[in-house]
Image: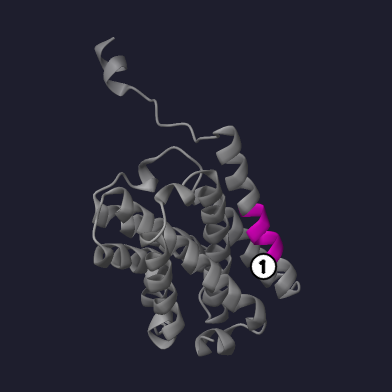
């Protein structure tokens, strides 16, 4: 188990499974993107790794904390194992709504964990919330940048918003000194519920529509 999580979070029994689930789901999404592009096994492993640990790595660098997966060999091994599994199985087994919902759980679980770790290290409340969002979203953003794919940030679908909801609820609950396990569970489920609703009903955010040029011409 990652010793940093044991030292920082009292309920590490819950924290570490969240790390593994989030890492595995994101690693799978990275491996499948490489598979969709017909890339090699090495490239698939690389995409699985940067997607699985990208968000947590960015968070740790920003808050001046030792990067979590460097001290835990199981994390990198999990990414390699997921990529290997994806390599030897048909891509259609993994793509579709099931992976989308799994990704939603990983997103919000990582957001909660990132917020909790940041607060425990003395990061101020608002930056800690932002670190939660970064932890949940940055891996996918880095993956898309490396692949040259449209970033999730440029899509109208609700993705960053559910992570933000989980981060805010987690921070407020912990600051109110509510039981950690309850706060984590409620926060993650709230964000997951929002993301699931967006997937099911195709809920999107409105885009900017102000047309100054048209008014100037008029």
Residue 110 percent across, percent down from the top left: 53, 65
| Magenta stretch encompasses residue 68 | no
Q: Quadrant of residue 212?
A: top left
Crowdedness near tag 1: few (<14), some (14–19) or many (≥20) residues, C-alpha within 10 Å: many
Taking 33 as reference, is 9 above or below it?
below
**Residue occupying the point 42% across, 32% down:** 207
Q: Quadrant of residue 175?
A: bottom right
**Direction from residue 156 to residue 172 in the image, left or right:** right
| Magenta stretch encompasses residue 189 | yes
User: Looking at the rendering, in which quadrant would you find the C terminus?
Assistant: top left
Task: Quickly name the residue at label 1.
Answer: 184
Closer to the camera, 186 or 146?
Answer: 146
Q: Quadrant of residue 81?
A: bottom left
- The secondary structure that most of the magenta stretch takes on is helix
**Residue occupying the point 51% across, 69% down:** 128
Over which residues does the magenta segment extend?
Answer: 184-191
Residue 43 percent across, percent down from the top left: 25, 63
Closer to the camera, 61 or 106?
Answer: 106
Residue 213 percent across, percent down from the top left: 26, 20
């Amino acid at each position: 188990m990652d010793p940093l999580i044991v030292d920082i979070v009292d309920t590490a029994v819950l924290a570490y499974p969240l790390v593994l689930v989030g890492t595995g789901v994101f690693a799978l999404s990275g491996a499948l993107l490489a598979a969709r592009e017909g890339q090699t096994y090495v490239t698939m492993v690389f995409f699985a790794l940067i997607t699985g640990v990208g968000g947590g790595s960015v968070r740790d660098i920003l808050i001046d904390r030792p990067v979590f997966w460097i001290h835990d060999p199981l994390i990198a091994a999990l990414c390699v194992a997921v990529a290997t599994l994806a390599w030897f199985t048909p891509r259609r087994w993994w793509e579709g709504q099931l992976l989308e919902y799994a990704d939603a759980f990983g997103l919000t679980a990582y957001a909660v964990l990132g917020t909790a770790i940041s607060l425990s290290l003395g990061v101020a409340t608002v930056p800690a919330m932002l670190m939660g969002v970064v932890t949940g979203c940055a891996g996918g953003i880095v993956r898309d940048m490396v692949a040259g794919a449209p970033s999730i940030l440029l899509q109208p679908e609700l993705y960053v918003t559910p992570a933000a909801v989980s981060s805010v609820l987690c921070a407020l609950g912990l600051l109110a000194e509510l039981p950690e396990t309850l706060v984590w569970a409620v926060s993650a489920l709230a964000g997951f519920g929002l993301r699931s609703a967006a997937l099911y009903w195709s809920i999107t955010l409105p885009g900017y529509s102000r047309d100054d040029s048209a008014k100037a011409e008029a």
